Image: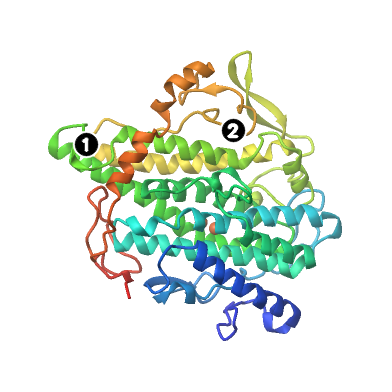
Amino acid sequence: MNSIDYSQKIPNNVNLSEDRRLQRALESWQPHYLDWWKEMGPEGTTTHDVYLRTAISADSQGWAHFDYVKMPDYRWGIFLATPEQDRKIAFGAHKGEAVWQDVPGEYRSTLRRLITIQGDTEPASVEQQRHLGATCPSLYDLRNLFQVNVEEGRHLWAMVYLLHAHFGRDGREEAEEMLARHSGDADKPRLLGAFNEETTDWLSFFMFTFITDRDGKYQLAALAESGFDPLARTCRFMLTEEAHHLFVGESGVARIIERTCQIMKENKTEDVKTFGVIPLDMLQRYLNFHFSVTNDLYGAEVSTNAANSYNMGLKGRFEESKIADDHQLDSTAYPVMHLVNGQFKMVDVPALNSLNERLRQDWVVDVQAGVSRWNRVFKKYGIDFELTLPHNAFHRAIGHFSDIQVTPSGDVISNDEWNRRCHEWLPTIEDRAYIQSLMGAPVTEPGKFANWIAPPPRGINNQPVDFAYVRFA
Ligand SMILES: [Fe+2]
Ligand SMILES: [Fe+2]
């Protein structure tokens, strides 16, 4: 049992009270965090009672406790997964050595950068989603939004703990910066592009949690392999929370598809706008958008930074220990897509340099599996339609393909043709306005759902679908 001490100001399972300096430092960051939450977190929600899950222990059993909580009173804390006895570094130049409990001096700045970049995404998504409560399609969905938000807040705590505990003054400064940068801010934006996009509507929210939180899953999984044990344990615990975010996204889009299919079938029409639900071609454009901007989060396909982090034993591959190779990759190759004489071809590059691309490809397989599950809904209704993922080179801003224009099916086209036709592939101003028009007043009566989305098959934590998941003061 790796239980969490809730008697402390900051709930934790890291014996925080035994390290007075660290405890004081984090306790002085805590009010800044709460100010940030009130200012930049979900808008106008401080008095709502929300049926939330809180971690009570960090082992696989019983870590989830459900109860009504006012979000500013949520017990954000520091929870690390149970340590693995005699854990060894699984990859890179230090393979086979005991994992580090302290930061190796020569890797300090690389490690701090990895933690800072991961940490920055967590509050960013809370900021991106802060207005969504005003247009919620149901109490069930509102509660899920808030659950995702409080857990992203906790993920920030996880990274800030590492910065404070292991990086001294630099770490404390980075922790302050986490609250000073804001999503979409002209002067101090968040570090990564996709986290400066606005999440203006619930379709975007579901696509984001399905696709972009899944990038989070793969980044965390790669960091969960780290030879720096506190980071590995932190990320392992975060992954258990992340699974719910992916569920919220996938099931949200599935319920939108379900509702559109019902309308199409009942009325024998594809022209569903008059019925106030979301047309299938629009869903495809949103999918194209979120998939392509999230592709860019993996960085350049060929990267010496990624090679260095791997060599140093700081960031591994997805499920590193399940891969059958030497885990050092000095002389192995990995196929990476290139454009050669106008044709897309897989070209072998040194495996060590292609780790970003490998992680991205692992993620694509996972995204595709979810899209295939969505496509079963069309089948169920006998509707001849499939959502598809766009080509890897479509709408890229980073990497090999950032300066060419490519259609979703993979044809290289001129800038002129792109400008003429991109409205076919990416959400248009009209699409966004239509989606906004559907998402007007919030639906807050228990058991009621907005017209554009089907109810879920079951509620949260065995509660009925018409449970009062949020109570308003
Ligand atoms: Fe997160
Ligand atoms: Fe997440």
- Judge by depth and name the residue closer to the eye, 408 or 277: 277
Report helix, strand or loop for mark 2.
loop
- Residue at the limit of the structure toward the bottom, as seen here: 7
Q: Is residue 87 visible?
A: no
Q: Within 10 Å of the Cα at label 2, are there few (<14), some (14-19), or many (20+) other Cα atoms?
A: some
Q: In which quarter of the image is ligand 1?
A: bottom right
- Residue at the limit of the structure toward the left, as seen here: 267
Q: Position of residue 136 (x, y in %)?
A: 32, 57
Quadrant location of the N terminus? bottom right
The residue to which callout 2 is attached is 397
What label sits on residue 272 in the rendered view?
1
Q: Where is residue 237 in the image (x, y as percent from the top left)?
A: 58, 65
Where 85 sits versus 355, above or below?
A: below
- Residue at the limit of the structure toward the top, as seen here: 341
The numbered mark, 2 or 1, whose residue comes first in the sequence reads 1
Report helix, strand or loop for mark 1.
loop
Q: Within 10 Å of the Cα at label 1, are there few (<14), some (14-19), or many (20+) other Cα atoms?
A: some
Is the CB atom of the residue marked by disc 2 within 8 angstroms of ligand 2's nearest atom? no
Is the CB atom of the residue marked by disc 1 within 8 angstroms of ligand 2's nearest atom? no
Q: Where is residue 431 in the image (x, y as percent from the top left)?
A: 34, 36
Is 88 left, or right, of 36 in this rendering?
right
Q: Can residue 263 be seen in this view?
A: yes
- Judge by depth and name the residue closer to the eye, 110 or 329: 110
Where 252 sits versus 405, above or below?
A: below
**How many labels were placed on the picture?**
2
Q: What residue type is labelled 2?
A: Ala
- Judge by depth and name the residue closer to the eye, 334 or 385: 385
**Residue at (64%, 46%) from the top-left corner?**
323
Is 14 left, or right, of 388 in this rendering?
right
**Residue at (29%, 59%) from the top-left corner?**
138
**Residue at (75%, 40%) from the top-left corner?**
329
Q: What residue type is labelled 1?
A: Val
